[in-house]
Image (spheres, rainbow, N blue to C red):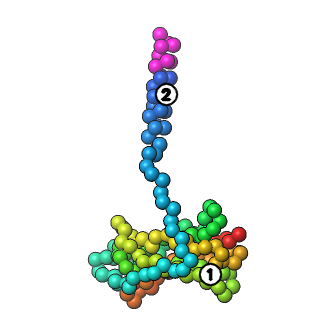
Amino acid sequence: MESHKQSSIIAAVIVGTVLLISGCSSTGAAPHPPRSTDSPIATKPSTGLSADSQVGGAIEPVLVVAGVDVNGEHVTASGYVSGVVADGGTCVFMFKNPANTTSVTVDNTGNADRMTTSCGMVQVPIARFDRGSWSVTLGYTSGNRVVESAPLTVEIP
């Protein structure tokens, strides 16, 4: 009797494990790699902020990620702007070397997301950067309002 009970428990654990693992598998298509550009991305004119596009709270650009991509060919950055949902503002990713003598700037058009304004992702060929530590910030301009994120550091090998 005891061995039958143990067998039932083991079988239940195996079935539960199989169901749990099968729920973790993905059958979707692989994501498309982001495109790369040697020049800044063209932007359309800003549409400004309207009262109903502001979500409340401070408007704040947020860098999500900044770093050298896995293949070492590009410096990648992405971000969003909290506190506003709007199409057409200008997102500016600015990379500066430590001495602030060289900078690389990429503009992207902000796109309304569900609760934020997405600035998307930018990729800059690594050849445009000298080796060393670089500071990156995300700025956002809409109408006459300009805000900037706190900087992140990117190490260029």
Q: Residue at x 67, y 71 (%)?
A: 155
In the image, taking residue 137 as reference, residue 132 lies left or right, namely right
Q: Residue at x 51, y 62 (%)?
A: 33
Alpha carbons under labels 2 and 1: distance apart: 55 Å
**Residue 147: % across, % down:** 46, 82
Mark 2 or mark 1: whose residue is earlier in sequence: 2
**Residue 141: % across, % down:** 43, 83
Could you tell me which secondary element the residue under label 2 belongs to? helix
Could you tell me which secondary element the residue under label 1 belongs to? strand
- Over which residues does the magenta segment extend? 1-8
In the image, taking residue 21 as reference, residue 46 lies left or right, namely left
Q: 119 above or below 43? A: above
* Image quarter of residue 77: bottom right
Q: Which mark is residue 96?
A: 1
Q: Residue at x 43, y 49 (%)?
A: 28
Dominant SS of magenta comes to helix
**Residue 66: % across, % down:** 57, 69
Q: Is residue 151 visible?
A: no
Identify which amino acid the numbered label 1 is placed on. Lys
Q: 60 above or below 65? A: below
Which residue bears the numbered disc 2?
Answer: 14
Q: Where, quadrant-wise, is the C terminus in this rendering?
A: bottom right
Of 72 and 111, nearer the camera is 72
Of 85 and 75, nearer the camera is 75
Identify which amino acid the numbered label 2 is placed on. Ile
Q: 148 above or below 67? A: below
Specify the farthest residue to the left.
Answer: 52
